[in-house]
Image: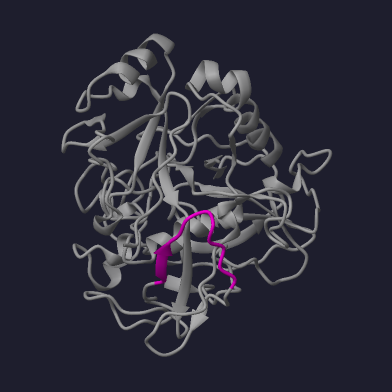
Amino acid sequence: MNEPNTPVLVGDMIPVTYNGTNWVKADTVNNNWYDYNRGVWANAVTIKDSSKRAEYKNAQAGTTIDLSYVNLMLVWIPRYSYTLRQSYGYQIEGGSTPSQATPGAFDIKFVDTNTTEKGTGKYTGTTPSNYYTPSSFCWGNTCDTTRSGNTELSGIWISKFEITGDIENITSIPNQASLTNKNISSLFNAIKNQINGSSGTTNYGLSGTSYDTHMIKNTEWGAMAYLSQSKYGKYGNSKYTNANKEIYQNKSNEYKTGCSFGIPSNSDTNYGCQYTYDIEINGTGASTTGTIYGIYDTSGGAFERVMGNYNDEKGQSGFEEMPDAKYYNKYTSNTSIKGDAINVDGTNGFYGDFTIFVVSASPWFYRGARYNYGVVAGIFGFASTVGAADPSYGTRLVLSTW
């Protein structure tokens, strides 16, 4: 059986599932929580009020979770290895013939922490081979190079939406304006300082020493993108066919999280929030699964800064010194890191998404594009930025646990 690793709940995180109307506490005992074969990725929330947090922690499965008490919604990406057939993946029923403009599926197999495969991530013929385990499932300073002396992870939690709230109160919830107009160091430090240690315990119910919450890295974005472009993600969802297998675009010019235009990236200038994240098909089509259980805002919305940097150039990020190596992916040439959904696996230009590599003068990656980027917006898009505060730029967070 190719089963995903069980999601690791940190502290008082609450596992949740959707009953068609509300998010409710999930039944983890009977595994009524997730099913990656059906595009039901595991979701969990953190609760900002300590008394309400204790109430939900002790509540029975099926108890409705009032989203007004939630400050983070998170989605579990289980550890996997991947490989890509030919140049553009394999065709799943309902999908277009694989090409750069209409890519097919990645072969994905879920693996445990004892498995770290080092193949090329590509193969020819019909039998999957040359699997590679991305460095996004590794925690430490040399994960992108030797991988020795680091901690291998069973999975990572990624914020369901772009981060919301304000710089002193980080959230990730739907139907809110993304937190923008902050330079990279401000976003990085706010996430790191608020959602770890004693602050993480007080405000989010997280506890222990075996986790780290941080601004998303380029390779972690790639882990989300590849899983979406597989039989376990939106590409494999039979409710979508041909061009509609691409993630629908968020065209909210107010940078409202979870919005969907109801079709993939396109040149329409009717900006706004046409469908919210919980509207079946037209709304959920903007997630990485095509269901409400996926990750949103990866196509359109705000430009999403990621911790991917060219040769330790600080640009206008605000960093006086670069953070520890485990917090960012370092690029020293125009070749990407395997699994980051840039170019080394041949994914550049998938779905016609934009492709601009980092350089010394513009040393920080951003992903996904903005609400008005039309046909070039998408989860496989990437471009460069100086890292300064800008009202068009936001980010999302990742919680790594071991």
Relative to 91, 346 lies left or right: right
Relative to 258, 117 lies left or right: right
Q: Name the magenta segment's main secondary structure.
A: loop
Of residues 40 and 249, the one drawn nearer to the viewer in this rendering: 40
Of residues 74 and 304, the one drawn nearer to the viewer in this rendering: 74
Relative to 275, 85 lies left or right: right
| Magenta-highlighted residues | 106-118
Q: Does the magenta stretch include residue 110?
A: yes
Can residue 373 be seen here? The reply is: no
Which residue occupies 52% across, 78% down?
130
Of residues 202 and 162, the one drawn nearer to the viewer in this rendering: 202
- In the image, residue 187 lies at what x, y percent? 63, 35
Furthest-bottom residue in this view: 125
Relative to 288, 309 lies left or right: right
- In the image, residue 200 lies at what x, y percent? 56, 23
Position above or below: 309 against 191: below
Q: In which quarter of the image is the N terminus?
A: bottom left
